[in-house]
Image: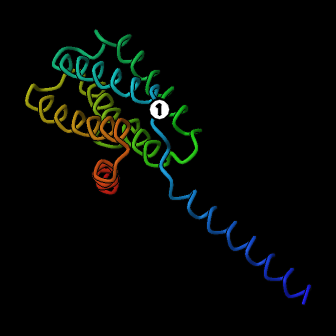
Amino acid sequence: MKKIKKVVIAVLIVGSGMFFSSCTALQTAPYDQYSYQKSVEIKVEASRLMDKATLPYSDHLEEIESLSLEIEKIVAYEKNKPNNGITYTMWQILSDEEKNLLSGFFKRWKEKETLSGIFVTEAKAQVMEAMDLLIRYEGQKDKEAKEKLLDLIANN
């Protein structure tokens, strides 16, 4: 009888451990003031800089490099936070020069030296929408914001 109790207790301990570890994988990182603030700062700076893309890239190299460094920092920061896969993935997309969002915009600007006003307007709208979704998710951490951000990630 004692042996059966020990087995039952062991099964319960292992089973509950597996249950709680699987729940942890589904968790969302808690609100983080730094992530929220840096996301807003990068959005504002990106918006301002994207407006200048009708002018020569070389005239704004220092500003672009400064923003690129800030993006690299936030990617590194987000990578190492627990339960933060969604935000980290979104920052990877924003920072990927092969994607059509923020770093992709700067790559195109560098290649072309100047961009048309129409292109800047359209590209900026897409980047700002993506940044708004990220900021909304960082600020609210609710189901709707999460689903919208996951949808954007799936389509990029």
Q: Is residue 112 left or right of residue 143?
A: left
> As drawn, which residue projects farthest toward the left?
118
Can you say whether 18 is above or below 6 in the image?
Answer: above
Can you say whether 123 is above or below 29 in the image?
Answer: above
Instruction: Point out residue 82 in the picture as x, y percentages from the top left corner.
Output: 58, 44
Judging depth in this view, the residue of 143 and 12 nearest the camera is 12
Instruction: Point out residue 31 in the picture as x, y percentages from the top left corner.
Output: 45, 36
Instruction: Point out residue 77 in the picture as x, y percentages from the top left corner.
Output: 54, 31
Residue under label 1, please give it: 32
Quadrant of the rendering where the N terminus is positioned: bottom right
> As drawn, which residue projects farthest toward the right?
2
Label 1 element class: loop
Judging depth in this view, the residue of 52 and 44 nearest the camera is 44
Q: How many marks?
A: 1
Please give the name of the residue rendered at 34% of the width and 40% of the height, measured from the top-left corner: 140
Q: Quadrant of residue 116?
A: top left
Q: Residues within 10 Å of mark 1 (few under 14, many from 20)?
A: few
Please give the name of the residue rendered at 38% of the width and 44% of the height, measured from the top-left corner: 141
Please give the name of the residue rendered at 47% of the width and 32% of the height, measured from the top-left corner: 32
User: Tag 1: residue type?
Assistant: Asp
